[in-house]
Amino acid sequence: MQLSLARIFILGGAFLCGTGPVFAHHHHHHHHHAHTVRTFYVAPIAQHPGSYYTYNNVSYYYPQVQTVGINAPPPQPEPLRYGSFSHVDDIAERIIAIANEFCLDLHYNYAHNPGFRETYREAYAILETAKYIDALEHQYQDRDAIRQRLKGMDELFHHVEEDVRGWSRFHRVQVGQLGIITKMEYMEGLIHHLMQDVGVGHGNPHLIPGGTLEVAPPPGPLTVAPLPN
């Protein structure tokens, strides 16, 4: 049974209304073996209309249309061609936004956990890497450098994810609308789509398996994720 596009967007719409997940997970049961298809759904946000998702192991961008005439055809999903560098700007800026929120959340609500300083340093490095990739795309178009940085970002993300999943939360400040685990899932989806867009990954290069934000702080009055100690 395939995951229909309609179901992807129903689930995505539920997230936008605050009642559903960022990512749709679809489960098949066949001869007692479970297989999970991850759609890596990324919803539109204020500064970045349009959504991303994965279908049959290919990333797609779905443009957001403000008004559609009665006879106008609906917008069509656009596959992200492997290595096309067609959406680097948009995806990198989304990663910067969610990585900043993630670092702020760690800083305010998770600093009591063992190993916090090292993990925060690594999480902040993800934020800095996303800024670096965005700057390269704007200024230098150094595509090999972008690919190398993205490989490192993906490895770093999975290391941070492994550290944080066992942590407890001591609530001090609510950062954004998503919890820490959902922030990580959102970031993972964005990294996944960026890897396809810039041509980083394993396996078939054509089929890669698949509001206003406070800034994470340097020390001082905190509006930005703080620099690591």
Image: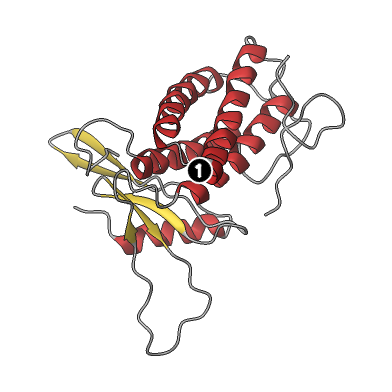
Tally the numbered discs. Answer: 1
| Residue plotted at (17% across, 33% down) | 32
Label 1 belongs to which residue? 137
* Image position, residue 163 (x, y; %): 53, 17
* Quarter of the rendering containing residue 104: top right
Q: Given the current orientation, which residue lies at the most extreme left position?
A: 31
Tell me if 151 is positioned left or right of 30 in this view: right
> Along the line of sight, which residue is nearer the eye, 54 or 34?
54
| Secondary element at image label 1 | helix
Looking at the image, residue 46 lies above or below residue 158: below
Which x, y percent locates residue 198? Answer: 37, 41
Answer left or right for 33 relative to 97: left
Q: Can residue 21 be seen in this view?
A: no
Dividing the picture into quadrants, the one containing residue 114 is: top right
What is the three-letter code of the residue carrying label 1? Answer: Glu
* Coloring scheme used: secondary structure
Q: Could you tell me which residue is drawn at 68 percent across and 22 percent down?
A: 110
Residue 187, horizontal then vertical, whole percent = 50, 38
Q: Is residue 100 at all visible to an observer of this figure?
A: yes
**In the displayed structure image, the side of residue 136 where residue 211 appears, left or right:** right
Query: Which quadrant: the C terminus?
Result: top right
Q: In this view, does 60 lie above or below 198?
A: below
Q: What is the quadrant of residue 46 in the picture?
A: bottom right
Decide: is 97 above or below 44: above
Dot 1: few (<14), some (14–19), or many (≥20) neighbours within 10 Å?
some
Where is residue 158? Give x, y as percent. Answer: 45, 23
